[in-house]
């Protein structure tokens, strides 16, 4: 799809309103299927027992934390370089969702780590870099709120997002670059997945479900952001009209 197809906010609103029910329905069905497979069909691990089922939330959450931030960085680059009118809207709308996914990954990782490592938290390379990612999300959102002018706020937030993108490869390759407690990649790897199909299928189903959920919430948040900006623009236009009307009378 051409980047300029949805550049018009009105066109985007129509397109988003049409696909939103379908994406939301697919998200609900996929998440329901994934949870059923993960909780009732997938066998317990021979070492971890039923504790391994935390993986079906932890891994998709971590994946989405990285995926959403990568999308934000891409949208920020588009906003800075090509001035696409919806790019900064997409990035801004994605930030709270990505932050929630990252926080969920950290919490479920802590719950999983306690029985496996004997501690709720260790300063492992991947855990630490994932915590940095959460701070990047929070800093991005705080910057939007701190700067009143939307144009300046969008530009500053986009620069911060692009600078913070260096953390993404650090998270991905931390288990390869350093000696960490975190297990190495077992799904996305050159030699193919090392997980048995009985675990892999529910895991991939949950990843797809989380992705569809993200798209659903993203569309809702983008539509709300565009509506808020339109209301703000109308208010500013009304104020400007009043000032222009009062100016000759004052003169």
Image (cartoon, grey):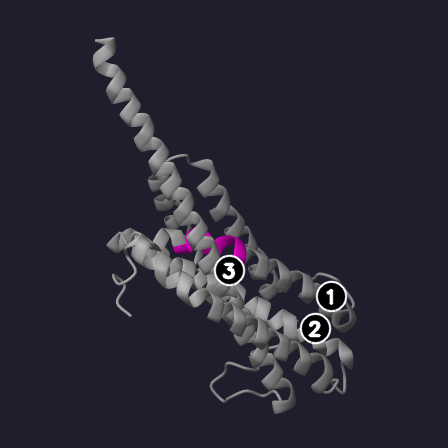
Q: Nearer the viewer, mark 3 or mark 1?
A: 3
Q: Is 38 placed left or right of 191 in the picture?
A: right
Up the image or down, 245 lies above or below 217; here it is above
- Could you give the CA–CA distance between mark 1 and mark 2, rounded to whole angstroms? 8 Å
- Could you give the CA–CA distance between mark 3 and mark 1, rounded to whole angstroms? 26 Å
Q: Is 31 placed left or right of 121 in the picture?
A: left
Quadrant for residue 179, please give it: bottom right
Dot 3 lies on which element?
helix
Quick check: can you spot residue 189? Answer: yes
Q: Measuring 47% from the left and 57% from the top, which residue is drawn there?
A: 220
Task: Identify residue for label 3.
Answer: 217
Task: Identify residue for label 2.
Answer: 54
User: Badge 2 local density, few (<14 within 10 Å), some, or many (20+)?
Assistant: some
Q: Are marks 3 and 2 in contact (CB under 8 Å)?
A: no
> What range is drawn magenta here?
90-97
Q: Position of residue 247 (x, y in %)?
A: 24, 15
Q: Measuring 37% from the left and 57% from the top, which residue is drawn there?
A: 13
Residue toward you, 129 or 40 = 40
Q: Is 169 placed left or right of 34 in the picture?
A: left
User: Badge 1 local density, few (<14 within 10 Å), some, or many (20+)?
Assistant: some
Quadrant for residue 128, please give it: bottom right
Task: Identify residue for label 1.
Answer: 111
Q: Position of residue 114 (x, y in %)?
A: 76, 67
Quadrant (top left/top right/bottom left/bottom right) for the N terminus: bottom left
Q: Is 191 placed left or right of 151 in the picture?
A: right
């Amino acid at each position: 799809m051409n980047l300029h197809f949805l550049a018009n906010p009105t066109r985007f609103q129509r397109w988003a309103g049409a696909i939103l029910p379908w994406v939301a329905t697919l998200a609900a069905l996929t998440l329901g299927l994934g949870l059923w497979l993960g909780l009732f069909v997938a066998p317990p691990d021979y070492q971890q027992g039923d504790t391994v089922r935390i993986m079906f939330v932890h891994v998709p959450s971590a994946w989405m934390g990285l995926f959403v931030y990568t999308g934000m960085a891409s949208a920020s680059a588009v906003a800075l370089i090509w001035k696409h009118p919806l790019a900064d809207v997409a990035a801004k709308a994605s930030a709270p969702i990505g932050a929630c996914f990252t926080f969920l990954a950290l919490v479920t990782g802590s719950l999983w780590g306690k029985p496996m490592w004997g501690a709720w938290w260790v300063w492992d390379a991947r855990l630490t870099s994932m915590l940095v990612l959460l701070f990047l999300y929070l800093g991005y959102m705080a910057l939007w709120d701190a700067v009143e002018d939307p144009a300046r706020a969008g530009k500053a937030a986009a620069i911060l997002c692009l600078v913070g993108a260096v953390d993404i490869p650090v998270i991905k390759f931390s288990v390869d670059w350093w000696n960490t407690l975190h297990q190495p990649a077992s799904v996305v790897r050159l030699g193919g997945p090392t997980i048995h199909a009985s675990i892999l299928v529910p895991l991939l189903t949950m990843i797809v479900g989380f992705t569809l959920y993200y798209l659903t919430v993203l569309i809702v948040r983008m539509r709300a952001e565009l509506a808020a900006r339109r209301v703000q623009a109308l208010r500013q236009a009304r104020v400007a009209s009043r000032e222009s009307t009062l100016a000759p009378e004052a003169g």
